[in-house]
Structures are given as structure tokens and as C-alpha cells.
Image (tube, rainbow, N blue to C red):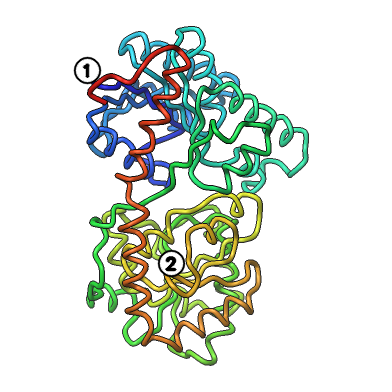
Amino acid sequence: MSLRIVHVLDHSLPLHSGYSFRTASILREQRALGWTTFQLTSPKQGHGPAQAEEAGGWHFHRTPSKPGTGLIQQMQLTAIRLRELVLAESPDLIHVHSPMLNALPSLWVGRRLRIPVVYEMRASWEDAAVDHGTTTEGSLRYRVSRALESFALAQADQITTICEGLRGDICSRGIAADRITVIPNAVDAELFQFGVTPDPALRTQLGLDGATVLGFAGSFYGYEGLHLLLDASAKLLAGHPQLRVLLVGGGPQEDALKAQAQRLGLQRQVIFTGRVPHADVQRYYELIDVLAYPRLPIRLTEMVTPLKPLEAMAQGRMFVASDVGGHKELVRHGETGHLFKAGDVDALVRAINDLLARRESWPVIAAQARRFVESERTWASSVARYREVYRRALSHFGRTLPTSS
């Protein structure tokens, strides 16, 4: 008899995000352990009447929604769909993932149907709202959001999170440390090719022949600090006349970045590819000499570890990253990557110049980074940690893990 788990999610594939990719990796490794999983997304997946959808090889139960549905209604709809799914599938436990808009309805259903609830806090919802500009730190909405998040954490049977920064934040809310388990972000190293020769046709197509290429691949959010990369590039151009900046992806800051490039006179140097299929992203990575992750120093980035540096390490790519807490938790300076002072354009310029001047060290750093990922940051090792989390959650109800688990 296998362990049966319902995962409650904000969104999933086919939407592309670090959240979606982490979820897919968790599901794959849990299935490899012999566990049975069911996946339910909230109304945040998008409007529409669909009750279910196949995506990325997975069957996702959906929560139908309509435009204009408020947050309270979204939670009510999630609770209704979750209750239906739990009654139909009889899971052993509910594993709910951020934000607390998912946690509160999951706790409501779990308590009424006497099913353990594990809450995975992947980010602080109130801090993400600050970055998106929908509230300000310390506002009434911020305080209410934080109070509800703390309530959800206090009520969950067990808590998981993605990094030490968030574990510290959870502890600061009065939650006992022994109820919190870190399930760190990881990568599938075997999915990333190491030391591959760049595609010459794509290089020519993008106008990068003979260029020194800086780059970024991902979503263009404000906290990523990509405007600092453009400012740094303008300063680097005198010493590196063949410099180009390859920005792969899109997002809320795209128009502002294009306007900034125009203002700096970098129209020819900065290439915006737009979003590309996930399967093709590595071809673009391979064209980049130095990746840049200039995240700004805010609560969100100080606490949360991103996936991108791990993906760069898996591919043996050189990168510079700001010294926010989320990066420092991942990057061993000078060994697997290079850190610079967050928010400081001149520090970013120095870091890039230093790295470009020491190309002879790149093979050693690339090999060390790849070994770090393979030995310490695989999804198989991360997901294996859930077994003890689930055992503890079930024990609160006098139950044990199914013997085959």
C-alpha cells in the first residue's frame, strides 16, 4: 500500500515558473519513491471552466474561476474543490504549498476530515506583494497578510520550507524549530549538458559572433535588479567594445529595460530574445560568457534561494551574483561562483571585469560547481527528506506511514 498525497498548488505547468518546475521535480521524485500523488491548483492557475488538465505528463485537478473573483472567494473555491478531491481519493495527507491563500482552505478541509496537513512555505506572501507593488512593508494589508501566514504556520501539523533564510523567518514567528524541515531547491544535473560547444547558427542569428556576452535567462521582475546589469554594461563597454548583453525571457520590467537600453545608447548591445521554449533555454545559456544575477537587497531576496545559480552550476557556466542572503546560501565565492555587493553597480562592474580577466580559472570553477550540484543539490536527495516530515505529520493523528513507503 503506497502513501497517498494531495498537493495543493498556487499554479502549475503548463505555466512556466520556478514554482512550477520545483513542483514537477517533487512530483517526479515522489512517484519514484512509490508514492501516489494528486495535484490540485488554485484559481490562480487562470480563469476557465476546466476541472482537470494534462500538462507536462501530469494530471492536474483545477479550480474553475471567473474574472473578478476576490481572494475570499478564491479560498472558498479552493476549499470546495479540495474537499471533493479528498473525498474521492482518500489521501493519507494534504501537502499544501505557498501562499497562505492555499494553506487556509487546506487547513479547513484537513481539520474537518481529520487529515494531516503539511504546509510548504516557499516564500513570504506579504514580502512578494511588496515587490509587486500591491502593498508596502508595514501597511495594514502587509500586517494582516503576515498574521494570516503566521496563523497557517502555527496550525499546520508539519512545516517545510526551501532554505535557511525562510526557516529563520518562520522561527521568528514563534514556531518551534523542530517543526520545520528545509527541503532545498535542487536541479537534475543530468538534464543539463556540461561543457557543450555553443550553437554557431544561433550565435550568428543573434548577432553575437566575436562578442563577449553577458546574460540573464528568466523572468524580468523588479527584484532581479536587471537595470543594474544594463548600467554596468554601459560602464564596461569602453574596455570591452565587443560586449553584448543577452536577456532571455520577459516579465513586468521588460518595457522599462528596453527604454533604459535606449536611454543608455545600448540598442545595438542589448538583445531581448523574448520568452523561449523551456527546452531551448540551454542553447541560449551556452552563448553567454558570464551570467549575471544582480538581485536587489530586499527581504524577499535576503530570505529566498533562487534556482538559477544552481542551473548555471550544473552547466558549468560562469556567473556573478549579488551577495543577498538567498545567493550566499547557495554560492561559495570563488569556488562555485562569484559574489559582489548587492545594489552596487561599480561592484558589479569590478566582479565582471575580474572574471573576464581570469578565464584560465574557469574550467576549475566549472568542475567544482558541477560537483557541488551533483553531491549536495539533487532532487532525489531533497525529496527523500519528505519521508520523515510525513511520518511526523501522520503521528499527530496516531497513524504511521504505509509499510511500502
Which element carries disc 2, helix, strand or loop? strand
Q: For the N terminus, which image quadrant?
A: top left
Q: For the C terminus, which image quadrant?
A: top left
Question: Looking at the image, is 259 positioned above or below residue 113?
Answer: below
The disc placed on residue 405 is none
Question: In which quadrant of the rendered view does residue 257 lie?
Answer: bottom right
Q: As drawn, is 60 to the left or to the right of 320?
A: left
Task: Name the one closer to the observer, 281 or 317.
Answer: 317
In this orientation, does residue 220 appear? yes
In the rendered structure, which amino acid carries the disc numbered 2? Phe
List x then y, in percent, for residue 198.
25, 75
Task: Name the one closer to the observer, 355 or 41.
Answer: 355
List x then y, in percent, for residue 399.
38, 14
**Residue position marked by numbered label 2 in the rendering:** 272
Q: Residue at x 51, y 26 (%)?
A: 102
List x then y, in percent, for residue 174.
68, 32
List x then y, in percent, for residue 117.
47, 21
Question: Looking at the image, is 399 positioned above or below residue 189?
Answer: above
Number of residues whose C-alpha sits closer than 10 Å to that of mark 2, classed few (under 14), some (14–19) or many (20 or more): some
Q: Choose mark 1 or mark 2, whichever is in front.
A: 1
Question: Looking at the image, is 15 positioned above or below residue 51?
Answer: below
**Residue position marked by numbered label 1 in the rendering:** 1
Question: In which quadrant of the rendered view does residue 317 lie?
Answer: bottom left
